[in-house]
Image (cartoon, grey):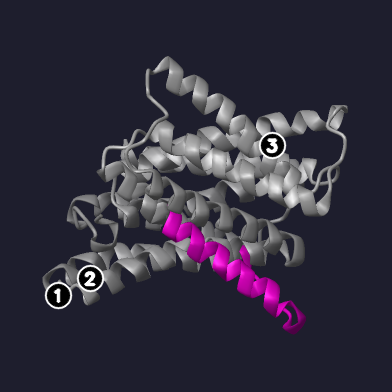
Amino acid sequence: MQALWMVLAALLFATMSVCIKLAAADFNIFEIVLARGLIGMVVMSAICRHGKVALRTPVPMMHVWRSVVGATALSCWFYAIAHLPLATAMTLNYMSGIWVAAFMVGGTVLLGRSTDFGRQDPLILTVLTGFAGVVLLLRPTLDQDQFLAGLVGLISGMSASLAYIQLAALGRVGEPETRTVFYFSLGTSAVGLGGMLLTGMHSWWRPQALWLLPIGILATLGQLALTRAYSRSSALLVASLQYSGIVFAALYGLVLFGDQIALSGWAGIAMIIASGLAATALRHRAMPSAPVEEH
């Protein structure tokens, strides 16, 4: 069941991306970010009230850190999308799984847990295999004049990995998923509002603004499923399953936008699925508590 939460999150985020693609013609990036955050706050506050989950938290600074790295990842990802080919931007962002593995292995080495290091090898291999599948599917390119945007794209993946690891840490200290998603929505709203002060805004009183509603709802539900996946399972496991979002995005592109997938792309999809299945099978061999997740 823990693995299915990640697959569901990937599907919700892929569907959200379709809505963003349609809304981006009428709204700037920060307007979409603000709408995502505001709708998330409304939805999650209602869910918290219904579930009698208090918004007051005993670990406010953990939420601040999660919001900072999460909002940074989101902002960098949208910047990369705006200045790079979409395939390149998505690939750089999906390197978050590689960064998760790197941080976990680095934490094991720094803490001197040599006996735990070897037990991580199989799951690290599934993450690397999944990313290789992403490269085959998307076939990214990066021109020399796009170095800055490429660097920002790398930062988006690194920041996302830190946010995912923090989700696991919040789960281990007993923070409810609904409260965690509420505070992330709050941080996202702050970033969107701050960005709009610099870029301006369009009128939201028009039919095109209806696209902002499913973006916020899908993002909130996807974030809730993502939070539950990372707080209840191995971070390396769900990092592998995260790549299933590329499969959903490829299918959406094929059905809705007529995108053609080359043979190498279908080979990449097969590698992504295989890595996800392998990660699930290796679940019980993963470390029960990765060193970089301990607080």
Residue at image mark 1: 114
Q: Amino acid at mark 3?
A: Ala
Magenta-drawn segment: 137-163
Numbered tag placed on residue 260 in the rendering: none
Q: Amino acid at mark 2?
A: Thr
Residue at image mark 3: 35
Where does the image place residue 157, in percent across and percent down from the top left?
Answer: 52, 63
**Circle 2: element type:** helix
Residue at image mark 2: 108
**Looking at the image, which residue is at 68% across and 64% down?**
80
Q: Is residue 102 left or right of residue 194?
A: left
Farthest left residue? 115
User: What is the distance, in whole Å, between disc 1 and disc 2 at their CAs?
Assistant: 7 Å
- Label 3: few (<14), some or many (≥20) within 10 Å? many
**Circle 3: element type:** helix
**Circle 1: element type:** helix
Q: Nearer the viewer, residue 247 or 175?
A: 175
| Circles 1, 2 touching at the beta carbon (< 8 Å) | yes
Q: Amino acid at mark 1?
A: Ser
Magenta segment includes 226 = no
Q: Nearer the viewer, residue 98 or 183?
A: 183
User: What is the distance, in whole Å, between disc 3 and disc 1 at their CAs?
Assistant: 46 Å
Quarter of the image with the N terminus is top left
